[in-house]
Amino acid sequence: MKKKVYGILLLAAVVIILLLTLQDSEGTVKLSEGLRLWLERFGLKSDFHSIRSNAHLVLHFLFGIVLCLYGRERGWSWWVIILIGCGVGLIDESIKVLLPTREFDVVDLVKDWVGVAAAMVVIWLIKRRTVGS
């Protein structure tokens, strides 16, 4: 059952990443501004630039969490998870080369990879703690 749930969540995460990548620049600006206004409703002040710059980190962290859970349930090694996580980030950025209003950004790629790496550390620590208990 866990494998199915993790599989569905993983597919949803990849689809969300792809849909956000395929947005035109106007769409990403509207989404970022909408998120900024939504956060303000909860008293969380954030500027537009910080939302735009941290979106990759947060999105790929969440993707990485689901990827780790799915992969570890299937018995994948951490190296396989690293390759898939980094590959998705690279594909995410590379698609933008083909889009007229988007561009490949090395900083965004690094944020994608850092997000996945942070997720891996979190899952590893949780698994280590629960196994050690």
Image: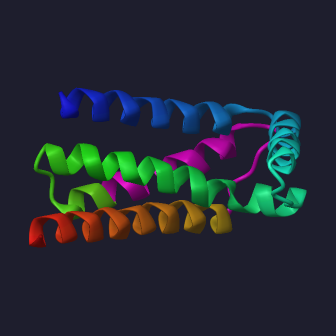
Q: Residue at x 31, y 62 (%)?
A: 123
Whether the magenta-drawn stretch holds residue 108 is answered as: no
Q: Quadrant for the N terminus, please.
A: top left
Q: Pick whichever, 13 or 35, lies toward us.
A: 35
Whether residue 133 is visible, yes or no, is yes
- Figure check: 116 above or below 125: above
Q: Pick whichever, 83 or 96, lies toward us.
A: 83
- Name the quadrant containing residue 37: top right
**In x, y percent, where is residue 92?**
56, 46
Tell me how the rendering is colored: rainbow
In this picture, residue 91 sits left or right of residue 99:
left
In this picture, residue 43 sits left or right of residue 6:
right
Majority secondary structure in the magenta region: helix
Whether residue 89 is visible, yes or no, is no
**In x, y percent, where is residue 29?**
87, 42
Q: Residue at x 26, y 67 (%)?
A: 124
Q: Residue at x 60, y 42 (%)?
A: 95
Q: Which residues fall within the magenta stretch?
A: 83-105
Q: Residue at x 36, y 45 (%)?
A: 66
- Figure check: 131 above or below 64: below
Query: Number of labelled discs?
Result: 0
- Name the quadrant containing residue 50: bottom right
**In x, y percent, where is residue 102?**
77, 45
In this picture, residue 49 sits left or right of residue 131:
right
Whether the magenta-drawn stretch holds residue 104 is answered as: yes
- Figure check: 28 above or below 116: above
Q: Quadrant for the C terminus, please.
A: bottom left
**In x, y percent, where is residue 118?**
44, 68
